[in-house]
Amino acid sequence: MLIGLISDTHGLLRPAVHEALAGVELILHAGDVGDQDILDELALIAPVHAVLGNTDDPFGLYLPRAIDLVLGGLTVHVSHGHELGRPQPERVAAAYDADVCIYGHTHIQKIERVGHQLIVNPGAAGARRFNLMPSVARLTIRDGLAEAILVDLPV
């Protein structure tokens, strides 16, 4: 199973996202979406599940604060991360009992294993901030194992 991971679009979906996420079966958006148009455009690539970020209007997007799924036999948790203050992989792993945890908020790309858990922050796909490259990630779940790679987006 191939899953696209995206976060912190803040109302901007770069055209390169279509190529970066081509072929995914599902897209998980870890919050700070911006507006419904972002989710509608992502849905042209694959079905989308998204969570509410700290800058999203809870009365405009009606998104859950977290999503827990079973994908390819693994448990997957998605939340924005702001609920943990300054999320770091160890903190995310301790907070959520899932095989794979996806978060955003910091805009900092990270893929780390903490014990048995795979923790992924796909970075920020929207406007470039904090001198970081915009990015998304591709998560592969196969035979009960999860692996992720980061995909930088052109500025």
Image (cartoon, rainbow, N blue to C red):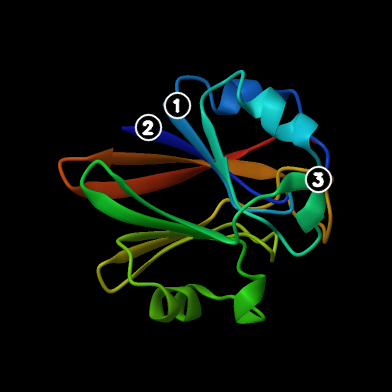
> Is 80 displayed left or right of 155 in the figure?
left
Q: Are marks 2 and 1 in contact (CB under 8 Å)?
A: yes
Q: Are marks 3 and 1 in contact (CB under 8 Å)?
A: no
Question: How many residues crowd around disc 2 within 10 Å: few (fewer than 14), some, or many (20 or more)?
Answer: many
| Pointer 1 residue | 24
Q: Are marks 2 and 3 in contact (CB under 8 Å)?
A: no
| Pointer 2 residue | 2
Tell me which amino acid carries mark 2. Leu
> Can residue 154 be seen by looking at this rendering?
no
Calculate the distance from the C-alpha at mark 2 to the C-alpha at mark 1: 5 Å
Question: How many residues crowd around disc 3 within 10 Å: few (fewer than 14), some, or many (20 or more)?
Answer: many
> Which residue of the protein is positioned furthest toward the left in this rendering?
143
Tell me which amino acid carries mark 3. Gly
Calculate the distance from the C-alpha at mark 3 to the C-alpha at mark 1: 22 Å
- Assign the C terminus to one quadrant of the image: top right
> Is 151 displayed left or right of 58 in the figure?
left
Give the x, y percent position of residue 33: 74, 46
The front one of 41 and 111 is: 41
| Pointer 3 residue | 34
Task: Kindly indicate the quadrant of the structure image that contains residue 77.
Answer: bottom left
Calculate the distance from the C-alpha at mark 2 to the C-alpha at mark 3: 25 Å
Q: Answer with mark 2 or mark 1, whichever residue precedes in sequence.
A: 2
> Can residue 69 be seen by looking at this rendering?
yes
Q: Answer with mark 2 or mark 3, whichever residue precedes in sequence.
A: 2
Q: Answer with mark 3 or mark 1, whichever residue precedes in sequence.
A: 1
- Assign the N terminus to one quadrant of the image: top left
